[in-house]
Image (tube, grey):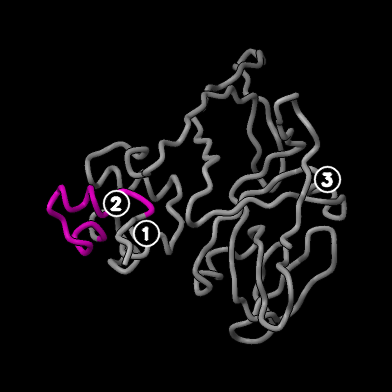
Amino acid sequence: MSTETPNRIAELRKQKRMTQQQLAEAVGAHWITISKLERGKIALTYEWAARIGKALGVGEFDIYKNKITRRNIFVSGYVQNGGIGYFYSTAEGKRYEHPLDIEIDLFTRAETSWFVIEDDAGFPFFQTGDVVQVTWQDNDAADDFISRMCLVGAKDRSGLILGFLSRGKNIGTYDVNVVGGSVVKDIIIEELGFISMALFNAAVFDEGGPVAPEWVPDS
């Protein structure tokens, strides 16, 4: 049986001689959540890495097995109140940019998958050639992703559904507002992933330079 782990939480926790219960108390979570994070059953988001790293006395990026690239981008403004955007500006009205460190995780980890958008049916959200990263979750975590864009596998339906998740009419069921389509109602979720990153108009490179993404279906 393989002892490979998807992250370094257990390794660093044991170095600190902490139990899962002690780490859970330090980050304000249940020990079962810590167990699932260690085994990759719950996605290790940046927020989780920051909380756990602080509790273990290490940097958040030390929690990951593969180093995540950090990029400094310059943000021109912000959006709030349901979609109202503002430029950063001084009291005198002069616009400025605010530096922001972000994580760029392009690795395919145990809990993530990448999907390419093959047509324009999802416009205006996506167009042909866009690529989305899906971070998979336990099905019983569906309530945590209400109103989030998700990729969902439903009982008795072939394929996956890309759209915004909401609660269904019946207990234990959910609706999906399909991107660029109608609403699929009262499904029972069998697979659940949320859209954790999107690359718009992504170029795919070969030896000769950028080319349009090409999807090769499984045989």
Is residue 213 positioned above or below 86 on the image?
Answer: below
Name the amino acid type tagged 2.
Ile
Q: Which percent across, then down, holds residue 195?
A: 62, 53
Q: CA distance from mark 1 to mark 3?
A: 34 Å
Find the distance from the CA under tag 2 to the CA under tag 1.
8 Å
Q: Which residue is mark 2?
A: 9
What's the residue type where badge 1 is placed? Leu
Numbered tag placed on residue 37 in the rendering:
1
Q: Nearer the viewer, residue 37 or 106?
A: 106
| Quadrant of residue 197 within the rendered picture | top right
Q: Amino acid at mark 3?
A: Thr
Out of 22 and 135, give the one closest to the viewer: 135
The N terminus sits in image quarter = bottom left
In the displayed orientation, state which residue is furthest to the front: 219
Residue 8 is covered by the magenta coloring: yes
Q: Position of residue 215 (x, y in %)?
A: 77, 50
Q: Main secondary structure of the magenta part?
A: helix
- Of the numbered discs in the image, which one, if any, rests on residue 128? 3
Q: Is label 1 in a helix, a strand or a loop?
A: helix
> Where does the magenta region start and end?
6-24
Relative to 96, 70 lies left or right: left
Residue 76 belongs to the span the image colors magenta: no
Whichever of labels 1 and 3 marks the residue nearer the N terminus, that label is 1
Q: Looking at the image, which residue is at 15% across and 48% down?
A: 16
Eye-nearest disc, 1 or 3: 3
Residue 214 image point, x, y percent: 78, 44
Mark 3 to mark 2 CA distance (whole Å): 38 Å
Neighbourhood count class around disc 3 (C-alpha, 10 Å): few under 14, some 14–19, many 20 upward: some
